[in-house]
Amino acid sequence: MTRHLNLPGLLFLVALAIAWQVAATIVASPTFPGLLAVVGALSTDRGTLLLELGHTLLRAASGFAIALAIMLPLGILLGRVRALGDLVEPVIELVRPLPPVAVVPVSMIFLGIGDAAKIAVVVYGASFPILINTIDAVRSLDPMLSHVTRSLRLTRLERMRLVDLPAALPRIVSGIRLSIALSLLLAVVAEMLLSTDGLGAFLMRAQESFRIAQVLAALLLIALVALLINLCTHAIERRALAWHQSIRAVR
């Protein structure tokens, strides 16, 4: 941990925090609270914030899990079966550029404003990084692997499970990490538009009543949670890909 500690980056972050507090003290405006005021609001409203955080994380995790369970095997299938991939690719390229926020009205029409609609928005946004990375990873595999699987007389399903997935895993994991970050982001956005609970709804209520310290406290909590999630996923990635050269090289 100490060997990989980014001390200059941490010192720069501390300097920014000090500059923020000094600037807020000089301005002395209720619309520009300092870091200490934001931390105080975070401590005062910690019970409410933790409760709302639980709703947000549950929706983000549910949407990500659904996207992973569907898009990972689908991506391997589309990458391995070229004809099927070429057939579906125009549909993917047509739908992929649509921003997830644009899906919110459609989700509300078909699923109401409950958890199902918000999870559907998360699933939509989190699906494409996994799907695209998986397809590209499988298609870019060494052709020698296909010859080896044929010589071993593996079935197509065995090829996908025993060869394609492990060999393409480094690039697939990159898409998964991106999807995890998007899941939290989209859960908050969906709650701002559709929900009465969650951190997104908390942000909207605080903004409407001009409680700027509470708004920034919620944003700070989201940033800290996102950082913690990123550290956990990075640790899992290093453990899962300990055999890969990209991980072994940085040790």
Image (spheres, rainbow, N blue to C red):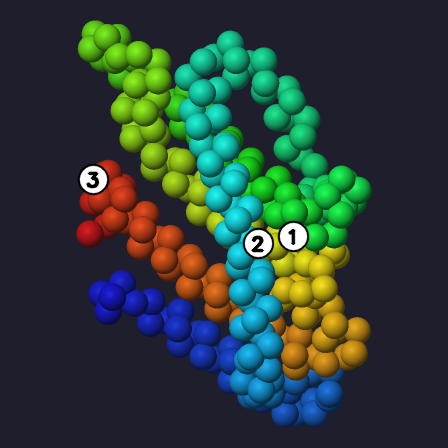
Which residue is painted at 59% across and 82% down in the image?
Answer: 45
The image shows residue 216 at horizontal and vertical percentages of: 63, 75
Residue 242 percent location from the top left of the image: 22, 44
N-terminal-most mark, 3 or 2: 2
| SS state under label 2 | helix
Q: Nearer the viewer, residue 5 or 210?
A: 210
At horizontal 68% and vertical 70% (from top left) the residue drawn is 202
Which residue in the protein does label 1 denote? 115
Q: Determine whether 91 is above or below 147 in the image.
A: below
Left/right placement of residue 71 relative to residue 196 reads left
Quadrant assignment for the N terminus = bottom left
Circle 1: element type: helix
* Residue located beneath label 3 in the image: 243
Q: Is residue 198 rendered to the left or right of residue 179?
A: right
* Vertical relation: 226 (above or below) 132: below
What is the C-alpha distance between the residues marked 1 and 2? Answer: 7 Å
Residue at 27 percent across and 44 percent down: it is 240
Q: CA distance from mark 1 to mark 3?
A: 39 Å
How many other residues sit within 10 Å of disc 1, few (<14), some (14-19) or many (≥20)?
Answer: some
Name the amino acid, label 2.
Answer: Arg
Residue 37: which disc? Answer: none
Instruction: Identify the mark at residue 59; answer none if there is no mark.
Output: 2
